[in-house]
Image (cartoon, rainbow, N blue to C red):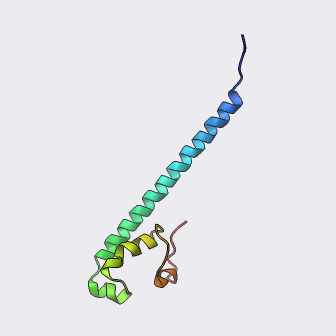
Protein backbone atom coordinates (compact mmCIF):
# COMPACT_ATOMS: atom_id res chain seq x y z
CA UNK A 1 0.00 0.00 0.00
CA UNK A 2 1.42 3.39 -1.02
CA UNK A 3 0.86 6.49 1.05
CA UNK A 4 0.66 9.81 -0.75
CA UNK A 5 1.49 13.00 1.07
CA UNK A 6 -0.21 15.97 -0.60
CA UNK A 7 -0.45 18.20 2.42
CA UNK A 8 1.95 20.94 1.32
CA UNK A 9 0.79 21.24 -2.33
CA UNK A 10 -2.87 21.03 -1.32
CA UNK A 11 -2.38 23.68 1.36
CA UNK A 12 -0.64 25.93 -1.17
CA UNK A 13 -3.42 25.39 -3.68
CA UNK A 14 -6.09 26.23 -1.12
CA UNK A 15 -4.17 29.33 -0.07
CA UNK A 16 -3.80 30.48 -3.70
CA UNK A 17 -7.48 29.81 -4.42
CA UNK A 18 -8.55 31.72 -1.30
CA UNK A 19 -6.34 34.64 -2.31
CA UNK A 20 -7.91 34.75 -5.77
CA UNK A 21 -11.42 34.69 -4.32
CA UNK A 22 -10.56 37.46 -1.86
CA UNK A 23 -9.04 39.58 -4.63
CA UNK A 24 -12.19 39.14 -6.74
CA UNK A 25 -14.38 40.16 -3.82
CA UNK A 26 -12.26 43.26 -3.20
CA UNK A 27 -12.40 44.18 -6.91
CA UNK A 28 -16.18 43.70 -7.02
CA UNK A 29 -16.61 45.84 -3.89
CA UNK A 30 -14.42 48.59 -5.35
CA UNK A 31 -16.38 48.52 -8.64
CA UNK A 32 -19.68 48.65 -6.75
CA UNK A 33 -18.54 51.67 -4.71
CA UNK A 34 -17.39 53.49 -7.86
CA UNK A 35 -20.72 52.76 -9.53
CA UNK A 36 -22.61 54.12 -6.50
CA UNK A 37 -20.38 57.23 -6.46
CA UNK A 38 -21.01 57.76 -10.18
CA UNK A 39 -24.76 57.38 -9.76
CA UNK A 40 -24.86 59.79 -6.79
CA UNK A 41 -22.78 62.35 -8.66
CA UNK A 42 -24.99 62.04 -11.74
CA UNK A 43 -28.16 62.50 -9.64
CA UNK A 44 -26.66 65.57 -7.97
CA UNK A 45 -25.67 67.12 -11.28
CA UNK A 46 -29.08 66.33 -12.79
CA UNK A 47 -30.76 68.24 -9.97
CA UNK A 48 -28.99 71.46 -10.97
CA UNK A 49 -30.73 73.96 -13.22
CA UNK A 50 -29.58 74.54 -16.78
CA UNK A 51 -28.32 77.98 -15.77
CA UNK A 52 -26.19 76.54 -12.95
CA UNK A 53 -24.79 73.85 -15.23
CA UNK A 54 -23.94 76.51 -17.79
CA UNK A 55 -22.19 78.54 -15.06
CA UNK A 56 -19.92 75.62 -14.15
CA UNK A 57 -19.29 74.88 -17.82
CA UNK A 58 -21.30 71.72 -18.42
CA UNK A 59 -24.22 70.94 -20.64
CA UNK A 60 -26.85 68.43 -19.60
CA UNK A 61 -25.62 66.00 -22.27
CA UNK A 62 -22.21 65.76 -20.53
CA UNK A 63 -23.46 64.77 -17.09
CA UNK A 64 -23.03 61.00 -17.41
CA UNK A 65 -19.50 61.46 -18.74
CA UNK A 66 -18.57 63.94 -16.00
CA UNK A 67 -19.93 61.64 -13.30
CA UNK A 68 -17.96 58.68 -14.73
CA UNK A 69 -14.75 60.70 -14.79
CA UNK A 70 -15.19 61.89 -11.21
CA UNK A 71 -15.95 58.36 -10.00
CA UNK A 72 -12.79 57.02 -11.62
CA UNK A 73 -14.62 54.90 -14.20
CA UNK A 74 -13.38 56.92 -17.17
CA UNK A 75 -10.20 58.73 -18.07
CA UNK A 76 -10.11 62.39 -17.06
CA UNK A 77 -10.48 64.32 -20.30
CA UNK A 78 -11.76 67.69 -19.16
CA UNK A 79 -9.18 70.24 -18.08
CA UNK A 80 -11.50 71.67 -15.40
CA UNK A 81 -11.69 68.21 -13.76
CA UNK A 82 -7.96 67.54 -14.00
CA UNK A 83 -7.16 70.91 -12.43
CA UNK A 84 -9.87 70.72 -9.75
CA UNK A 85 -7.89 68.47 -7.42
CA UNK A 86 -10.83 66.03 -7.31
CA UNK A 87 -8.97 63.03 -8.56
CA UNK A 88 -10.68 59.65 -8.03
CA UNK A 89 -9.61 57.46 -5.14
CA UNK A 90 -7.23 54.66 -6.16
x, y percentage for residue 90? Answer: 55, 65
Q: Is residue 73 left or right of residue 48?
A: right
Image quarter hosting the N terminus: top right
Quarter assignment of residue 18? top right
Q: Foreground: 1 or 55?
A: 1
x, y percentage for residue 81? Answer: 47, 80
x 37%, y 71%: residue: 41
Is 17 placed above or below 76 here? Answer: above
The number of discs equals 0
x 49%, y 72%: residue: 75
x 51%, y 54%: residue: 27
Is 3 placed above or below 79 here? Answer: above
Is 25 placed above or below 5 here? Answer: below
x, y percentage for residue 86? Answer: 49, 77
Quarter assignment of residue 7? top right
Quarter assignment of residue 43? bottom left
Q: Foreground: 72 or 52?
A: 72
x, y percentage for residue 37? Answer: 41, 66
Is 3 placed above or below 60 here? Answer: above
x 46%, y 66%: residue: 73
Amino acid sequence: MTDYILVAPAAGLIFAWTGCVAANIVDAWRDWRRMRHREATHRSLESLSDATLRDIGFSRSELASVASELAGQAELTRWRLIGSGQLPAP
